[in-house]
Image: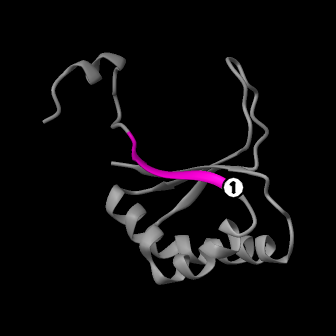
Amino acid sequence: MTAYAVAILRDVEMGAEIVEYLERIDATLAPFGGEFAVHGAVPVPLEGTWDGTLIVIAFPDAERARGWYDSAAYQEILPLRTRNSRGTAILVDGVGAGHRATDVLRPAS
């Protein structure tokens, strides 16, 4: 089942380190099948307020998503981002095809 790395970044300082991070991140994603689903899009708030830039990276499954984040290649470039932005990052499982809203009412199997 698809899993996602999701980040909301704020106060990004676009300098040499962020540029280097952006130049290197794709190579860290490739071995784990990661691809950007959302990156740099301007959000259109429909309810509430929005503060930040949304990034969503899709992976074939949770194991590969975690493998990417924990990989030596990604951990090497991570400080380039964290030194130059504030934010929140999470890994989350997606839902399967045909998922219905009421599926969350059933006990997990």
* Residue picked out by circle 1: 86
Residue 106: x percent and y percent? 19, 22
Question: Please, is residue 46 above or below residue 11 in the view?
Answer: above
Query: Residue at the location (43% across, 73% down)?
Result: 70
Query: Residue at the location (39% across, 49% down)?
Result: 2
Query: Residue at the location (70% across, 18% down)?
Result: 46
Residue 37: x percent and y percent? 60, 49
Question: Please, is residue 109 above or below residue 4 in the view?
Answer: above
Q: Tell me the chief SS of the magenta region.
A: strand
View extreme (left): residue: 109
Quadrant in which the C terminus appears = top left
Give the extent of the magenta segment.
Answer: 87-94
At numbered mark 1, what does the secondary structure look like: helix, strand or loop?
strand
Q: Is residue 26 left or right of residue 33?
A: right
Task: Locate residue 54: give its quadrant.
Answer: top right
View extreme (right): residue: 15
Q: Is residue 102 magenta?
A: no
Task: Locate residue 62: give its quadrant.
Answer: bottom left
Q: Is residue 40 left or right of residue 106?
A: right
User: Label 1: few (<14), some or many (≥20) within 10 Å?
Assistant: some
Q: Amino acid at mark 1?
A: Arg
Task: Locate residue 86: give its quadrant.
Answer: bottom right
Question: Please, is residue 86 above or below residue 50 in the view?
Answer: below
Q: Is residue 70 left or right of residue 41?
A: left
Residue 93: x percent and y percent? 37, 45
Q: Nearer the viewer, residue 40 or 16?
A: 16
